[in-house]
Amino acid sequence: MKKLSILSFILVLLTMKYSFACGGLFCDNIQPVNQVAERIVFAQDGDNRYQMHVQIQYQGPPQQFSWMLPVPKDTEFSLSLPKLFSTLDTQFAPVFTITREAANDCSSIFDIFDADKSASDFIQYAPDEEGSAEVLSRENIGPYEKVTLQADSVEILTTWLTDNGYQVPDRAQEVLSPYIENYVFIAIKLLEGKDTGDIQPVSLHFSSPKPSIPIIPTSVAANPDMGMIVNILGSQKAIPSNYALVEINEALIDWFSQGSNYSDVVSHAIDESPNGQGFTIDYAGAHASNPFEFDPLFPESDLNVLREVSTVNDLRMDVDVLMGLLIDESDLEFIDTNSVHYLASKIFEDEYKRQIGDYDSFYSCIFQQASQGLGQESECDMIFNTAIDGAIIAERIQFEVNDVIVNLQNIFNNNPYLTRLYTTLSANEMTLDPEFSFNPDITSDVSNRRNATVYFDCESGEDLYIRLSNGNEVDLNDGVNTNLVQRENGETVRGEDQIGASLISRPLESGQAEIITDNRTTLKKRYQVSSDGCQQSPNLGLLFFAVFVMIFGLKRRSA
């Protein structure tokens, strides 16, 4: 059965109020927490203008992949790069590490860090004579066929989509009706011959006073505790303007497994916010460097050569340009799939297959050692004499690689501050579209580096307690943290009685946030450990002394 990460049919409304995206999943190295979540990047792009980059995750047959976006007419659609999301995850996902210290005197002092565990073929179409749907444009962009449509009714729109091989959900009438009058629709599907592995992130440029995610339509097919990571690039700290802001109780984190239950803790904490709607901040601060600053572009000189190519042999005659378009398939595991070389080579391979066909034979002929004259009737000679439009290849590399890299360089250069927000939502909690804004008065940064100290007994080596960065101390039972929470199907099944949120507040667009729930004092009292590593309890000696004084005083009075 096919499965799209949020919906098999994605709705994106980019208006004065809304903008929406479906994201994906990144599992990089062992340090960042593995957050299975939708990934969205918003970037300020001038006054009341934003870019939205979306990592699409889809599982299922490639011919059943469809994406539908209701958009205003000025929305620009283009591609993005996977590197954007992988870089943000690597640099700014939460990292949980522990430091070990002796709880008592030792002959040696241990200080152990466990950080290591831790262009397109554009075609204009005239309106259909029967008025069933007006095809404003159709173009191939990267792995996608993208069509822009306008229709007078949902029935007309969905009929056109179905007739043209696009997947349409059962509740299309309900979710599309509000947009049919004032918006056009962008629909994308994979080109013939493309697989789900060819799915590439997309970007949209649109006008809006603030970005927002209309999550309500997602409730139709959302999994319990569906994660959502929203990275916002701007000049200052971003906030959820209509969702709560939640600080988690880090005593519930599994520090010994580098925070592997982080998503469960976040879900448990956010369930304590009003209507279960809130975000926690994974990171807030300057991003320090532009991850695309030193990315090379495909050379303009090579693009100029490609623009003049009319046969395969023309290309073969310029070895430098040709080698920049080929990769050794046997070394794929060592190739940087984010490199310009790789991206350009995939475009060339795709375009060769589209214009000519058998790419494998061409590849073999290029690398065979025997030299054959063009006048001979060999298979390779026929391949080399085949016509190919190099200008189209050059246009695609310019549009899908160089222009994308330059744009990503610009949004990082123009927006020095990054806020990474994270939430999980189940279907019953998707009743309010989260909106985002900026607050110049909230200047405190949030580090993604979370550290705790584990105190152990020198003689036995047993871990006694964990001291958190806020000073709270968590007692360990035989070296085990019994405060951990675990979630299943959107519910806490272990640690249900644990306080998940340290602080819940309502952010404002100016001034400081309004406090909704403050559990910090309660947690401070709960998590106190004595010097011998035991959870503190009333001092019985003092208690007996007080009772003795009281009884002695009563006897003296009676005497």
Image (cartoon, grey):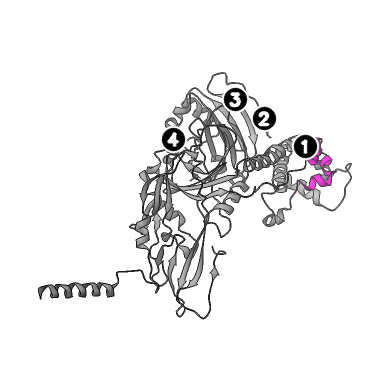
Magenta residue check for 108: no
Question: Does residue 494 appear in this view?
Answer: no
Query: Where residue 539 appears, x then y in whole percent?
Result: 30, 72
- Residue at 44% of width from left, 28% of height from top? 178
Left or right of 119 in this view: 550:
left
Query: Where residue 26 appears, x then y in whole percent?
Result: 56, 51
552 or 21: nearer the viewer? 552
Q: As shown in the figure, which amino acid type bears the numbered disc 4?
A: Asp
Q: In which quadrant will I find the C terminus?
A: bottom left
Query: Where residue 301 appears, x then y in whole percent?
Result: 81, 40
Q: Which residues are magenta?
A: 298-327
The answer to whether mark 1 and mark 2 are in CB contact below 8 A is no
- Cα gap from disc 1 to disc 2, whole angstroms: 16 Å
Count of labels in the image: 4
Could you say whether the residue bearing mark 3 is in a helix, strand or loop?
strand
Q: Earlier in the sequence, mark 3 or mark 1?
A: 3
Query: Residue 136 has which mark?
Result: 3
Q: Main secondary structure of the magenta part?
A: helix
Residue 139 versus residue 273 in the image, above or below = above
Q: As shown in the figure, which amino acid type bears the numbered disc 2?
A: Phe
The answer to whether mark 4 and mark 2 are in CB contact below 8 A is no
Which residue is identified by label 2?
122
Mark 3 packing: few (<14 Cα in 10 Å), some, or many (20+)?
A: some
Which residue is identified by label 1?
390
Which residue is identified by label 4?
170
- The residue at the far left in this view is 559
Residue 170 versus residue 546 in the image, above or below = above
Q: As shown in the figure, which amino acid type bears the numbered disc 3?
A: Leu
Residue 181 versus residue 302 in the image, above or below = above
